[in-house]
Image (tube, helix red, strand yellow):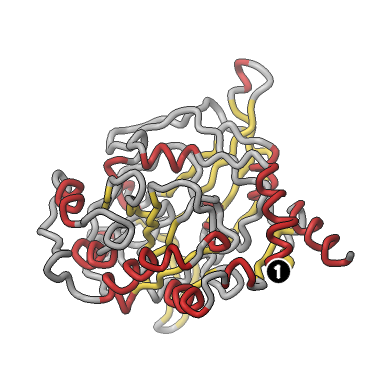
Amino acid sequence: MADAAPPPSKRKREVAAAGEDAPGTEVKEAKVAGVGNGTAAPAHLPFSGFRVQKVLRESARDKILFLHGKVNEASGDGEDAIVILEKTPFQVEQVAQLLTGSPELQLQFSNDIYSTYHLFPPRQLSDVKTTVVYPATEKHLQKYLRQDLHLVRETGGDYKNVTLPHLESQSLSIQWVYNILDKKAEADRIVFENPDPADGFVLIPDLKWNQQQLDDLYLIAICHRRGIRSLRDLTAEHLPLLRNILREGQKEPQLGCHLPALNPQREGRDLQRAVGRGLCVGFIRCLKEAILQRYQVKGDRLRVYLHYLPSYYHLHVHFTALGFEAPGSGVERAHLLAEVIENLERDPEHYQRRTLTFALRADDPLLRLLQEAQKS
């Protein structure tokens, strides 16, 4: 069982994927007013007041609600903020506490042996995960607003002539990524690291996973090396890197890639010593061993994949529990790492040539640009 994670710092990672089916391309910008690592101490929201303007999106199935509100109105015209409220999963080891003693109940229905109640849990068992986007721009508001989706097929030529120029014209800040890599934020949440600036990486729990249960395990490997934006940039040059992600992770730790027993105080140093340097033995070598060592989840119970389109344009790999229907793990967006490797082995320029299918929101400018280019 993983240690409880402290509250994340205020910044955007892939929080949009918590109920988002398509990444969009116009809203990868994140304004980070401050960075830092969470603690267990009481905290305050980074604004005063919250007057609800609109429910941007809600999901009864996922038990999540996206709210747009006005804040800081007492000191002026107010500012826009987005608050995302999500019910957290039950903790198996704590759930019995809900039924001990005399729980507060309201009867809703009773018939023969069946009855339904509303149960009001104690404070320590009723937390709600709260994500804040503040200050929020119009792009953020549109990002979280429910939109119809459209499938598009992007050829290699479309990427070069339409998608890439469009991305380069946007203000797609990924400063929050660099804050993690530079230890300005979330340093205490890093599970695994090779600090080499060219070939290193960090492995960190995704914000959608609270680290309290393994059913929805979700980690992200982010490389230190800059300039590899997405699947489209991968060539045969990256095969050693990709093979190590997959091959070294699907077996028990072995000599040369042994992970010592960990504790929260020294795990970063231990894991750092456990890996070598260089592209072939560096980037995410032994990552699945790290997951196995800390979370006791073997490689054949992990889904390892890349997104296209990604939520942010800095190479990263997703590790999720196989039984977890993670947002963005559908066939129109997720590309299994094993298949990526095979494709590059057959054709080193596979992802420069291949037509890729993905979904875009109806209001995404890239959708219109691709549709117009494909008509001409």
**Residue 78 x %, y %:** 65, 24
Vertical relation: 79 (above or below) 20: above
Q: Residue at position x 27%, y 38% from top? A: 40
Question: Quick check: can you spot residue 211?
Answer: yes
Query: In this view of the protein, which residue sits in the foreground, 223 or 135?
Result: 223
Q: Quadrant of the C terminus?
A: bottom right
Residue 197 horizontal side relative to residue 289, left or right: right
**Residue 315 x %, y %:** 47, 55
Q: Quadrant of the N terminus?
A: bottom left
| Residue placed furthest toward the top | 75
Mark 1: few, some, or many residues within 10 Å (few <14, many ≥20)? some
**Residue 61 x %, y %:** 54, 66
Q: Residue at position x 66%, y 35% from top? A: 137
Residue 37 horizontal side relative to residue 176, left or right: left
- What amino acid does circle 1 point to? Thr
Residue 263 horizontal side relative to residue 331, left or right: left
Occupied quadrant, residue 116? bottom left
Vertical relation: 358 (above or below) 47: below
Query: In this view of the protein, which residue sits in the foreground, 367 or 363?
Result: 367
Q: Residue at position x 15%, y 61% from top? A: 259
Residue that carries the numbered disc 1 in the rendered image? 155
